[in-house]
Amino acid sequence: MSQDKQVVSPLPGIFYRKPDPDAEPYVKEGDPVKAGDVIGLVEVMKNYQEIQVEEDGTIASFAVGNEEVIEAGQVIVVLK
Amino acid sequence: MIKVVKPGLETTVQDEGRIGYYNIGMPPAGAVDQFAYAVGNMLVGNEAGAASLEMTYMGPELQFQQDGVITLTGGYIPPKINGVEVPMWKAISVSSGDVLSFGIVKHGARSYLAVAGGISVPPLMGSRSTYTLCGIGGYDGRPLKAGDVLTIGRMRARAVKAGTKVPDKWIPSITKPHEIRIVMGLCSYRLTDESKALFLQTEWTVTPEANRVGYRLKGERLGFVPRDQPFGAGSNPSNVVDLGYPIGSIQIPDGVEPIALLNDAVTGGGYATIATIISPDLSRFAQVKTGEKVRFVSISYEEARQVRIDFKQRLTQINEHLEGAM
Amino acid sequence: MAEFSTRYSFGGDEFIFAELSEEMNLEVNFRGIAITRKLKEKAFPGILDICPSNASYLVRFNPEEIDAHELLAELKQLEREVANLDEIEIRSRLVDVPVLFQDPWTHEAVMRFRDRHQDPESTDLEYAAQINGFTSEEEFIQAMTDTPFIVSMIGFVPGLPFCFQIARQEEQIEVPKYVRPRTFTPERTFGFGGAFSVIYPVQGAGGYQMFGIAATPVFDREQRLPDFRDSMVFPRQGDIFRYRSVTREEYDAVRKRVEAGTFEYRKQEIAFTPYDVLRDPEKFSEMALGRLYSD
């Protein structure tokens, strides 16, 4: 368990799991991801910042929900 | 020269601002945290008014292409040189090839990078500040992009010793919830007495719609004194005949979600303004992040004047201290 | 005019706001022009900005250089000095501003933001014509173009002119602003909100009703056009704008000249007193249009 890696938000804002409201989520629990893959967007100051994973792994869980307000440094996703 | 490897979220060239053009609708722009900006220039020995970089939430990655002296002030976005964390509020030597990058913002919202000599961009109407809404000033009128190359200017007033730092007692501390001082007035007569009281009691949350133009805040709904709307004002009770908005003024469109204006303010419009953030506290307000809470504290003009005197005095003391340390 | 005594207020530590009237009218706008002009002439040290607006004005000052209470006393004194508005002469320009009404660009924006409008079933122009008692859009356009407007304030963003029609109040057009502001307004949109027409200098947010698009800019960042040689911003408070309805052909022709950098506004210098306007707005408007198109 201590091997779990996390993806944290570099900035505060609103977290989105989808590129737009009608689209499919970028990733789901259980999906394998590679470094550089986008897992969501954070909106702040009318900017949409892509959140990428830094290491290869599998999405174990989302720590925040779609359209939830998050803080800088908050964990978004746990990888295994 | 400084090469922009990654631009960060919104990194712009800013200085003291473009003063004297408010009447044509041109806001001053300039560093929103004037305290951190001014101290940055002092630390690297620049003339007051030299341009710096303002970085919001996510810092850029910059590569120095010449030796120099820099400092980072303002909100704590942990700075690193070649991957190693370096302290803020301290003059640092950099060598050609060094890379400045940043960790995840810890507290505050904006950091300032001052470079000995200042960032050299053409001044426009007396300022190098970027005003992105009209695409003027700064670097091409826009936030930095990857691949941009910044030139270092010659606005150096004195040589500084690397390692010179600002004593802790002068570094602003951040208390939560943020208490921001205001002077009530302007069109505050439009609010009911209950709503005036509620405005001051409420802990307002900063929404994601918070940029250099203004911060939109969430909290309680406020009510206006009923009236037949005067000719020309528009039909909503929050509407007034379009008037000038001071920097720092707070308006409440339709009684929901107050907007507090910052340096890139819209200079006027048709919503009743009810209070103005005092200028020393604008520097503190600019460090409040989306999602954080703010309480407004009403003070008199005389008290505001005293806070301003103290603020200016603190800057003078820091400058004298740093001059002595050179 | 209803009795009203000016409300003075401090805006933080650097601003004084003076609200001359809660309602808009030509007389109060002239009063603001007169006071702020006198203040400018006094050239006090420490005054950073003097911003006259429609029925109020704003002064930004440096409290280290000028005492706020002394400045406030000075402003009250200036207000007394201009009480009868007799002494001031306004020197400004009469300007012909070609507007394409019901154009495709603002129409697209009108349709995009129907859910933020009072009347989602009609266009902005249909709605505004109807609530102002006009039987057709053409009649409504004619009412906006037959009589010139005075630039009563500049602001919001650089160069945006708030324009107030030189007419008796009962003949003036008044419309509400959008229920919720739009996130998009095309550059050069001719808009209307409250009793004011505007031209949006740059693309951006906005809450005014959208009726058309001006062929000509009010803001020129590059200062390419001759009218912008001295400033990025064309309008000045006190200017008199005549919005002239043009065809698509004329619009396109003007746009070509603007893009080539050769366009110059048709304009005439004018000097007048507030009294000239207030005594008989119709006659003044007629005279102004006569002069503008005389040569």
Image (cartoon, coloured by chain):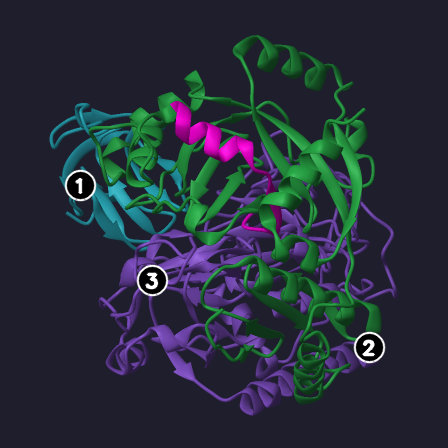
| Secondary structure found at label 1 | loop
Q: Are marks 3 and 2 in contact (CB under 8 Å)?
A: no
> What hue represents chain C?
green
Where in the figure is residue B199, as x and y percent of width and height?
A: 30, 76
Q: Which residues are magenta?
A: C138-159
> In which quadrant of the rendered image does the C terminus of chain C lie?
top right
Residue in the picture at 57% in, 61% down: B32
Mark pair 1, 2: CA separation: 52 Å
Looking at the image, residue C188 lies above or below residue C75: above
Chain containing the residue with disc 1 = A
Q: Amino acid at mark 2?
A: Glu
- Does residue C165 appear to the left or right of B164 in the view shown? left
User: Is residue B140 visible in the rendered structure shown here?
Assistant: no
> Looking at the image, which is closer to me, C280 or B238?
C280
Labelled disc at residue B229 = 3
Instruction: Work out whether disc 3 and disc 1 sit on a shared chain.
Output: no
Q: Is residue C157 magenta?
A: yes
Q: Are marks 3 and 1 in contact (CB under 8 Å)?
A: no
Chain containing the residue with disc 3 = B
- Read off the residue under disc 2: B323
Where in the figure is residue B135, as x and y percent of width and height?
A: 62, 37
Chain depicted in cyan: A
Chain depicted in purple: B
User: Is residue C61 visible in the rendered structure shown here?
Assistant: yes
Q: Amino acid at mark 3?
A: Gln
Mark pair 3, 1: CA separation: 42 Å
Residue in the picture at 55% in, 43% down: B60
> Looking at the image, which is closer to me, A3 or C85?
C85
Q: Amino acid at mark 1?
A: Asn
Residue in the picture at 54% in, 37% down: C199
> Looking at the image, which is closer to me, B94 or C169?
C169
Labelled disc at residue A66 = 1
